[in-house]
Amino acid sequence: MLALAVLLAVAGGAAFYFYGNQPWYIRGALLLSGLVMGSVVALFSSAGKNFIGFTKEAWREIRKVVWPTRKEAGQTTLIVFVFVLLMAVYLWIGDKIIEWAVFSLILGWK
């Protein structure tokens, strides 16, 4: 089944290039129809059925998630920004100390 699906998708791509002298919408319809038919055949294969089961289960799990409120999301974002700012200042100070140590103390540059 998967081989047939790939063959249909490739046939759609080949038709797109084979009918190069046709208008773009005809070529696009050929390509799209090949891809759609290949996708439909792939969904009826065992791997496709497993994929459909996986997506249904993932959707059920998404519905179980407790999403943060707008206030909680804003507070978390503010905490992240403050932390990033503090880390930037800390790294800048560390960089300046290392720069001073290397250029002034070790190399003797002024």
Image (spheres, rainbow, N blue to C red):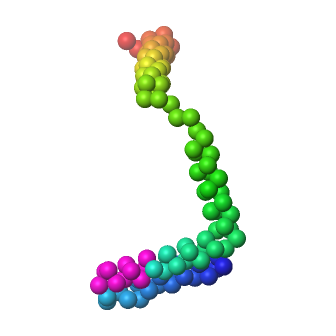
For the residue pair 33 and 58, the one nearer the viewer reads as 58
Quadrant holding the C terminus: top left
Quadrant holding the N terminus: bottom right
Residue 57, above or below 3: above
For the residue pair 99 and 31, the one nearer the viewer reads as 31
Residue, far right: 46
In the figure, residue 64 lies in which quadrant? top right
Image-based side of 49 in relation to 21, left or right: right
Main SS, magenta residues? helix
Could you tell me which residue is drawn at 58 percent across and 45 percent down?
Answer: 62
Residue 29, above or below 99: below
Could you tell me which residue is drawn at 54 percent across and 82 percent down?
Answer: 8
Q: Position of residue 4 (x, y in %)?
A: 62, 82
Residue 103 in sight in this render: no
Residue 86 in sight in this render: yes
For the residue pair 49 and 63, the one nearer the viewer reads as 63
In the figure, residue 44 lies in which quadrant? bottom right
Could you tell me which residue is drawn at 59 percent across and 77 percent down?
Answer: 41
Magenta-tinted stretch: 23-32
